[in-house]
Amino acid sequence: MRSHVPTVLITGANRGIGLEHARAYAAQGWRVLACARDPARSQALVELQRSYPEQIEPMALDVTDHAAVDALASELNDETIDVLLNNAGTFGPQGFPDGMAYQGLEQMDYEIWRQILEVNLLSPFKVAVAFHDHLARAERPLLVMMTSDLGSIAQNTQGKSYAYRTSKAGLNMVTRGIAQEWPDIIVIAMAPGWCKTDLGGDIAHIETKDSVREQQRTFARVTLEESGRVLDRFGAVVAW
């Protein structure tokens, strides 16, 4: 019987924070189930897989397609997942700050708001539920919901970005609830900081690789006693 290779499943692994997590975990020898809507069209993910052919396993997954989520969970039915990283997210058609233009008080695009909620809130809930059994097999299962400081009600001193803020505030609530119902799985929401990604924009002040490095350090030491919390990349509690 072969020994278990630590395994992480990452949604939205084709770019930004998800891609960097895939890179960092692969470099540590982890098996990486790298999910994206169309992995073959992500040149960065294709190149990463070439660099780590034994670690990276690209998988096609549109997280808003619940039937596809169930199908992938069934395909991986016998697998053990040590870390499930619900990373796929969106600010809408444009990143920050341009994306603020369609989610303000006077210029809300309600269809975009619905799409943001679908990707950022409903989808991670669906993925978590679908892969519960895969996580439960792990010795130290960890479910991570990628949230944002913009989801903090206490830190909201500016308003604006209503669609994105509400999606992440809702995700924080989902994280808290799941942690209560799954007492044997560590469930956290991770606020990675304002990173230089397609979503965060070029004016962000945190390099993605630096954030991911600290996130993974936090993932490695977080305990069941901290389950249900929103944490920043250093492991400090973020105000609700």
Image (tube, helix red, strand yellow):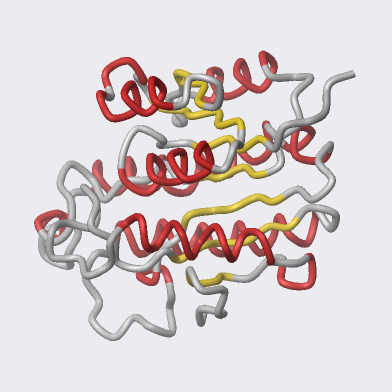
Q: Is residue 179 above or below residue 8?
A: below
Q: Is residue 8 above or below residue 46?
A: below
Residue at image point 50% right, 26% down: 56
Relative horizontal placement of residue 66, taking residue 194 as reference (left or right)? right
Residue furthest to the right in view is: 1
Which image quadrant: the N terminus?
top right
Relative horizontal placement of residue 78, taking residue 24 as reference (left or right)? right
Residue at image point 45% right, 18% down: 60
Image coords of residue 16 (percent x, y) = 31, 45
Relative horizontal placement of residue 142, taking residue 97 as reference (left or right)? right
Residue at image point 9% right, 56% down: 98
Q: Is residue 123 above or below residue 207?
A: above
Image coords of residue 70 (percent x, y) = 63, 21
Residue at image point 71% right, 42% down: 82
Q: Which picture quadrant has residue 219?
A: bottom right
Q: In front here: 41 or 209?
A: 209
Image coords of residue 28 (percent x, y) = 56, 43
Q: In front here: 167 or 209?
A: 209
